[in-house]
Image (tube, helix red, strand yellow):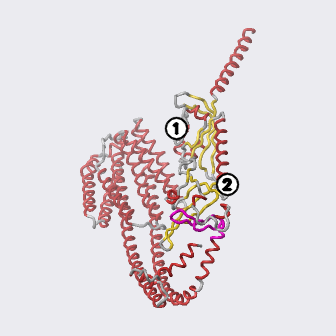
Amino acid sequence: MAILMHQSDSPAASSNPQARPSLPRRCSSWLFSQKYFQAKLLSGTAAGLLVIIFLAGIFVFVSYRNHQQEALRMRTIEVMRLSSVIENDIAALETGHRGYLLTGEPSYFQGFEERRVTIKNRIEDLTAFILDSPQQRKRMLRLQEIIHGWITTVALPEMTARQPEAAASGILPSIALGDSMLDQGREMLRTLQNEEQVVLNQRMREQERAAPSTQILDFLPKLERSVVEMEKEKRGYLLSGDPRFVESYKTATAAFYSYHGYLSILVANAPEQTALLKEIRADLEQWISISGVSGIEAKRAGRDTEAFARTRDGGVLMAQIRQKITAFESNELALYERRSTGANRERIVKTTALGVLCLFAVGLLVVSNSYSTVLVRRQLTKLDGVETRIRSIIENILDGMITVDEEGVICSMNPAAEKMFGCINNEMVGHKFTKLVPKTYAAEPEAQPVACAWDDLARRTGSTTLAVGRTRRHAVFPVEISLSEMTVANKKLYVSMVRDVTERKRFEQEIAAEKESLAVTLRSIGDGVITTDVQGQIIMINNAGETLTGWESKEAIGQPLKTVFNVAIDLAAQARAQKSGYRNEAHSILLNLPENATLISRDGNEHVVEQVASPIRDNKNEVVGVVLVFRDITERQKNETERRKAETLEQLGLLAGGIAHD
């Protein structure tokens, strides 16, 4: 209440003629006085109109900039798409070259020539998009030179020298293909894609509606390239017998399945595209079965005739795969164009709506300010009730509220504070604040309370401090103090919010005791217990777990489970787990943990353990960790083995006795 009284008395104090206020203060007083109130309010309306006009100009500028960014984004995406398609065409060019060398069929030569013309046209299209970049334009000219040089110096001479009689004889030529001259061209295209991707990320704001199609159109050329690379590397191996082509074939196969997985997720809501994607995968797996793997195995076994025949069989199927990929890309490109058109239409609608809204806001601002001239006058009459409402709030809040001056002397206390400290009728006003709060706790946990100094407490303004409160009858209890600073009539005051935390401290002690009881229980369990988070990192390990693994708890916490709980794993099971692609390490542990395993401790000792893993779930039933319980059954297994040996010897003895009796 003293604060409110100071606030209400401040205008009178400022009118003291002995201290003439400064020019800025006099201007501020005139601006916020009731004199010429209507003119001031209308001038504020005019200022508001100017602000709205300024905002409208910014809005037009932003709309134009968004249009420019959209045009640049479309150009960047087209450059990335064309560069990926050209990269696929280069791989297809090499595939046709190797196919002709392998089979001598004219269809491969014809396809080679068609692909050659296609690459030329697409490079010209790509060059048209990058005319404003001299460096990229030079790169495209260099790419044309590389492709032309490879065709004239490598491909055409080898294809011309290829005799059809060699294919009829069933003997595959062995040609040292080496590293292709086109690798430099591929690197140029990938550099171009990376540069355009950087531009797209730095300058564009991605449209959410067209984003899935953009990602699909980015993955599709890579999917097609992996298919072409598979056929190319297989033919390279059949021609040269170089094992490096087999490794490249495997890499291309893995890339196909990766891109196929990404695309499957992106088109999950499109049944037609999903079905077409499944057909592409099924056809490719059929090609791998009848031509890819079988052709490589035939070459390894020296059966060139069989490898030649399987290459012929797979050609038609590979053409079907390319056609389906092309159809898939056409469908997605059409969908992308529809989505982009819809996004543009939506942006135009939003722009128009915002323009209309701005006009409406201008009219509303004029009307509202005219009305506020009358409304403000009425509101001025209600200011007298503000003090009453504030007093009611202060007197009825549950936390204690104490006002303290710079010297630490209490200025006022609300009823909750008086009740908390056992005071009546403001009897503590004028006393030191440290009389009510004699001790405070340091920031360190488990620290002992120390004598409270007001200067130290004032330096903690803006933070929460745990302290010891003392009533008038010298009863102590824990309190939580939050200090805030304010200035009233050029005088600094502090508002201390005091909360009795006796019940909270009791709950904390009960929780700590329960945690200690749980820890003692876990330490007393004879079985090893390890808990991990969803990433498989250890959170807790008990004493039995430390003994069996050889890791101390402080060292094991934070380590991956596989590092501490080192068990022998079946390689085949591990490979299946890697292919399964679990969402996280916790699911992998739950689904792949064997019932029995050999645990290798940190010091190298081996223990046969029996283990079981259970999930830890949160209130949303989501898996947030794993509890692993295991026990040492080495001795039990050893006894079981000895028992079986004894039974076997006993049966052998009975059998021998029966034979001797006969």
Label 2 to label 1: alpha-carbon separation: 46 Å
Is 605 on the left-hand or right-hand side of 510? left
- SS category of the residue bearing label 1: helix
User: Which stretch appears magenta?
Assistant: 394-416
Left-right relation of 13 to 2: left
Query: The residue under label 2 is which amino acid type?
Result: Ala
Q: Position of residue 295 (x, y in %)?
A: 43, 42
Q: Dot 1: within a 10 Å radius of its alpha carbon, few (fewer than 14), some, or many (20 or more) residues?
A: few
In the picture provided, is 453 more to the left or to the right than 525? left
Residue 512 spot, x, y in % from top left: 64, 46
Where is 194 relative to 615, above or below? below
How packed mark 2 is, by other alpha carbons closer than 10 Å (few <14, some 14-19, many 20 or more), is few
Res 28 → quadrant: bottom left
Residue 409 drawn at (x, y percent): 55, 64
Vertical side of 585 occupied by 338: above or below: below
**On screen, residue 550 above or below 427:** above
Q: Which mark is residue 11?
A: none
Q: Quadrant of residue 418?
A: bottom right
Query: Measuring 65% from the left and 34% from the top, which residue is drawn there?
Result: 527
Residue 90 locus on image (x, y percent): 34, 54
> SS for tag 2?
loop
Residue 401 vertical placement versus 539 (above, below): below
Instruction: Please count the marks in the image.
Output: 2
When asked about the image quadrant of residue 53, the answer is: bottom left
Residue at left 39%, top 68%? 74
Residue at 75% in and 9% down:
661
Q: Which residue is identified by label 2?
A: 475
Residue 345 versus residue 421: which sits nearer the camera? 421
Q: Is residue 161 left or right of residue 68?
A: left
